[in-house]
Amino acid sequence: MHHQRCEIDRRSVRVRLTERGRNIRDLVSNLFLRHAGGLEDRGVLGPEGVIEITASLKRVERYWVDQIRYIY
């Protein structure tokens, strides 16, 4: 990742992926697609199941983030 302080507001930081970061993002995305396809092909989960699990994991992540916020 590349980050750069904003010239106008030094509190602000602009963040972007470097070429290497984009390559890693693409690798992880392709890995996820292959795994999701494998789950569907083997009948473990259908598209609805993957969507449901993703939504559930997002809710769990939101819960954890909220718990961390209240600690500090």
Image (cartoon, helix red, strand yellow):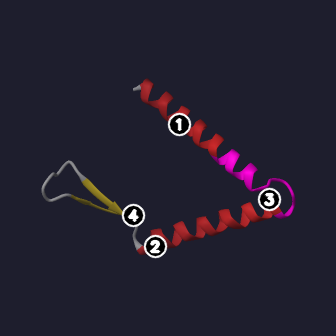
Q: Residue at x 63, y 44 (%)?
A: 55
Residue 39, label in figure: 3
Secondary structure of residue under mark 4: loop
Q: What kind of residue is marked 2?
A: Arg
Which residue, given by chain and number where applicable, does mark 1 sit on? 62
* Residue extent of the magenta highlight: 41-54
Residue at 87% in and 61% down: 42
Q: Amino acid at mark 3?
A: Leu
Q: Give the class, few, some or many, for how many residues have Cα within 10 Å of label 4's Cα (few <14, many ≥20).
A: few
Q: Quadrant of the C terminus?
A: top left
CA distance for labels 3 and 4 = 31 Å
Q: Nearer the viewer, residue 34 or 68?
A: 34
Q: Quadrant of residue 31?
A: bottom right
Q: Can you say which quadrant of the picture contains the N terminus?
A: bottom left
User: Percent position (x, y) of residue 68?
Assistant: 47, 31
Instruction: Say the numbered circle drawn on residue 1.
Output: 4
Q: Upstream in the sequence, badge 2 or badge 4?
A: 4
- Residue at the limit of the structure toward the front, as seen here: 48
Q: To which residue does mark 2 refer? A: 20
What separation in Å lies between label 3 and label 1 (alpha carbons)? 25 Å
Q: CA distance from mark 2 to mark 3?
A: 29 Å
Task: Say which label, 3 or 1, has the lower sequence index.
Answer: 3
